[in-house]
Image (cartoon, grey):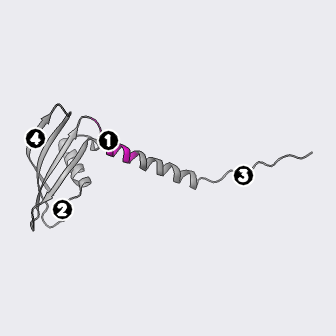
Amino acid sequence: MDIKIENKNDNRLLKRKEFLVRLDYEGKQTPSSAVLEAAIASQEKVDFMKVKAVKILSDHGRPHGTAWVHICDEPVKEKVEAQKKIDEKKAEEAKKEAPAEAPVEAKTE
């Protein structure tokens, strides 16, 4: 996938950078938001959690497209919440997989 940044805007009021990106994905399907976010994060050398693909449009019948991407100053709220849910699920699974403690026997006299 080839990514070309056509327009870059620094939006100080909303504390983010806004990008208009031209995509070329010859022989492949339209990239998902996660794939595009990872590619932009590595290209711009920023944390993946700060990148959000707002919209991806493909040119009809062609392996080209346009995307709007934001790089925020702080991690994107949706990604942070999603990561918390994943961490909670892992913690619950770890509790289920842990061996149950043996019941304590009462001493009789």
Q: Quadrant of residue 58?
A: bottom left
Of residues 68 and 97, the one nearer the viewer is: 68
Q: Which residue matches tag 2?
A: 30
Q: In the figure, 28 relative to 106: above or below?
A: below
Quadrant where the image shows the C terminus? top right
Residue 54 at what x, y percent from top left?
20, 49
| Crowd rating for badge 4 (residues with CA inside 10 Å; few <14, some 14–19, many 20+) | few
Residue 76 at what x, y percent from top left?
29, 41
| Crowd rating for badge 1 (residues with CA inside 10 Å; few <14, some 14–19, many 20+) | few
Q: Any mark on residue 86, and which?
A: none
Residue at figure coordinates x 7%, y 44% from the top left: 7
Q: Which residue matches tag 4?
A: 8
Q: Amino acid at mark 1?
A: Lys
Q: Amino acid at mark 3?
A: Ala
Q: CA distance from mark 3 to mark 4?
A: 62 Å
Q: CA distance from mark 4 to mark 2?
A: 22 Å
Residue 29 at what x, y percent from top left?
19, 65
Q: Any mark on residue 102, and which?
A: 3
- Dots 3, 4 in contact, CB < 8 A: no
Q: Amino acid at mark 2?
A: Thr
Q: CA distance from mark 3 to mark 1?
A: 42 Å
The magenta segment: 74-83
